[in-house]
Image: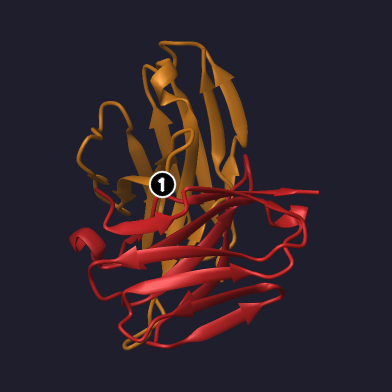
């Protein structure tokens, strides 16, 4: 299994500011992702955090708004830039542990960061 | 529209009652996951189903995957307030997402004491 921690667990921010969320995993993982869960909605994948290269963003998400760093196989950061109230969400870090050929991988999620933008 | 359809979207039950949540896909599922999210907290992995007809249980929660591997149900027996939360089903390979989990819309469960 993988144990994932996120900092901060929650924050209240002013419009126009930026917040960086940290994700730490207790083991080296190849695949690490960032999700967003807006109030009352299901999870939406923001991007795949690639170690040593630029993150891969899903449709509707851009690097200028959500810059991501992945300096090593156990750590990543997501920055929410120039925030607006519409960015109020829970942001979740996630990793996939590859179990091997013929076996289904298992995905684990961090506890989330609850962001409120005023 | 969601490739994974969950029903119902929300559910309010009296403590002690049984309930069922459904997750349906138009495609064959290769690995179906159930997660629970308590309000304001992160996701908790409940169980994973892979084989057609597979059934798994954990405490008072039972999940099944049908023979065609297109529908899964999550059944809670004798519900308790601690069961309250959002239940999400997830599957790989939906929307050509490869190794990524795609989630259903979630079912919000409230248990009245």
**In the rendered view, would you say A1 is above or below B84?**
below
Image-based side of A70 in relation to A40, left or right: left
In this view of the protein, can residue A106 be seen by the observer? no
- At x 44% / y 17%, what residue is drawn? A85
**In the rendered view, would you say A33 is above or below A20?**
below
Residue B42 in percent (x, y) is at 58, 49
Q: Kindly indicate the quadrant of the structure image that contains residue A60.
A: top left
Question: Which residue lies under the disc numbered 1?
Answer: A43
Of residues B59 and A79, the one nearer the viewer is B59
Residue A89 in percent (x, y) is at 48, 31
Of residues A90 and A101, the one nearer the viewer is A90
Image-based side of A105 in relation to A25, left or right: left
- Dot 1: element: loop
In which chain is the residue bearing label 1?
Answer: A
Image-based side of B89 in relation to B59, left or right: left
- At x 76% / y 58%, what residue is drawn? B80
Residue B110 in percent (x, y) is at 66, 47
Neighbour tally class for label 1: few under 14, some 14-19, many 20 plus, Cα within 10 Å: many
Give the chain coloured red: B
Residue B50 in percent (x, y) is at 40, 82
In this view of the protein, can residue A8 be seen by the observer? yes
- At x 26% / y 76%, what residue is drawn? B28
- Outermost residue, right side: B113
Image-based side of A49 in relation to A75, left or right: left
**In the rendered view, would you say A107 is above or below A12?**
below
Give the chain coloured orange: A
């Amino acid at each position: 299994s993988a144990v994932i921690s996120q900092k901060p667990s929650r924050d209240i921010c002013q419009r126009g500011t930026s917040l960086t969320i940290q994700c730490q995993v207790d083991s080296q993982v190849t695949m690490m992702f960032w999700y967003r869960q807006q109030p009352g909605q299901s999870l939406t994948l923001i991007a795949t955090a690639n170690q040593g290269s630029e993150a891969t963003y899903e449709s509707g998400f851009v690097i200028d708004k959500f810059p991501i760093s992945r300096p090593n196989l156990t750590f990543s950061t997501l920055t929410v830039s120039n925030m607006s109230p519409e960015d109020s969400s829970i942001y979740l870090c996630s990793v996939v542990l590859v179990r091997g050929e013929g076996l289904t991988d298992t995905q684990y999620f961090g506890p989330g960061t609850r962001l409120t933008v005023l | 529209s969601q490739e994974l359809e969950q029903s119902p979207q929300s559910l309010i039950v009296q403590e002690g009652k049984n309930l069922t949540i459904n997750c349906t896909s138009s495609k064959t599922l290769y690995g179906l996951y159930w997660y629970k999210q308590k309000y304001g907290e992160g996701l908790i992995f409940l169980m994973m189903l892979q084989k057609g007809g597979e059934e798994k249980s954990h405490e008072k929660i039972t999940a099944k995957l049908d023979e065609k591997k297109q529908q899964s149900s999550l059944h809670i027996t004798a519900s308790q307030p601690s069961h309250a939360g959002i239940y999400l089903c997830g599957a790989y390979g939906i929307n050509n997402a490869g190794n990524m989990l795609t989630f259903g819309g979630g079912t919000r469960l409230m248990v009245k004491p």
